[in-house]
Amino acid sequence: MLTRGFAIAVLTALVTLSVPHASFAKDGPRGDGGIECGLYDCEVEVNVPGQAGGQGNGSGAGGSGNAGDQADGGKSTDLTNCTYKLVDPPPPAGSLDWEGHEPGDGAVYEETCRWGDSGDTIVRIVWLAEPPGEDAVDPAVLAQQAVDQMTLLGPDIASPRSAGRYTVGVPVWMWVNQSATTYGPNTASASAGGVTVTAVAKVSKIAWRMGDGSTVTCTGPGTPYSGSAGMAESPTCGHVYSTTSAGAPGGKYAVAATSTWTIGWQGGGAAGQLTEIRQSDVQVAVGEVQVVR
């Protein structure tokens, strides 16, 4: 008996043999046999009088290639980027899709692969003894997912305030209120495929654009003003306006405070750092000292 298996996968046209089917040619002058087809593969069986089955060299009378080799012309090593989908419900016992195995011994999957560099896709039914391995989880991707779970906001500006009164030549003390969402630390984790990554975010600096063309960068939250400081400048984060805001739109300087969140993460045998930027705005009126005579 000569047996030849074929696995046929078509990208642009659906396989029309959607259910198992058998066709026999017992009365043919060249011998008897038949064709049995599954969803994606067929087995052709021919009995040729006077020849022993399975002894041919692939020259039309036999061959021992498996279905996968026939499907891709012996170039199965050219198949890349394969994905797998479990066939559900599984094929019935005796189906060619089991490749001689019994239900419960491994499983049958729909395999989708790219064929080399051609861009073509090969889809076929395969039996696997073990579930296909999952793609490796990238800890850096989980780190970004952890950051996305955080609520990272711009600075919670305590000073200068929109309702405040500021004067040319008088030091302005800038500082921010601190919380997990506006200054940190802020912690979150993300998991996938047995890998967990934990990220911790904290503001590392705040750049203040003062509206008069000046920029002040502060590496901390700033120091709250105390009346006992008098006319002294802030020891950590401050600015002195040299012109009034009278000529600015609305008579106020548009002040922007931009925080840089530095996020350290680790997990899955890796570690790294990410950066996020957030901004808050405030309008500040700056006047001149009024001299009363």
Image: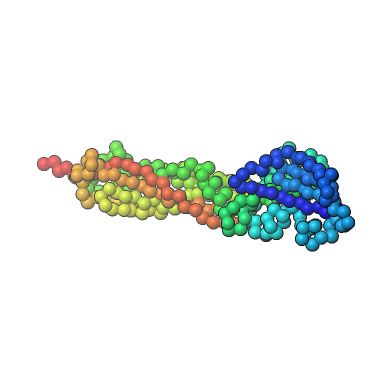
> 190 or 15: which is nearer to us?
15
- In which quadrant is the C terminus drawn? top left
The image shows residue 249 at horizontal and vertical percentages of: 23, 42
The tally of labels here is 0
Up the image or down, 209 lies above or below 251; here it is: below
Task: Name the residue: 32% across, 42% down.
Answer: 282
User: Residue at the spot x=65%, y=59% of the render?
Assistant: 78
Give the percent coordinates (x, y) of residue 278: 41, 46
Q: At 75% across and 44% down in the image, what residue appears?
A: 37
The answer to which of 293 and 283 lies nearer the viewer is 283
Describe residue 49's horizontal placement relative to residue 226 as left or right. right
Residue 130 seen anywhere in this rendered image of the structure: no
Most extreme residue toward the left is: 293
Residue in view at x 57 percent, y 49 percent: 142
The image's colour scheme reads rainbow
Instruction: Report the residue that reaches farthest toward the front.
Output: 29
139 sits to left or right of 212: right
Image location of residue 218, percent across then percent down = 38, 53
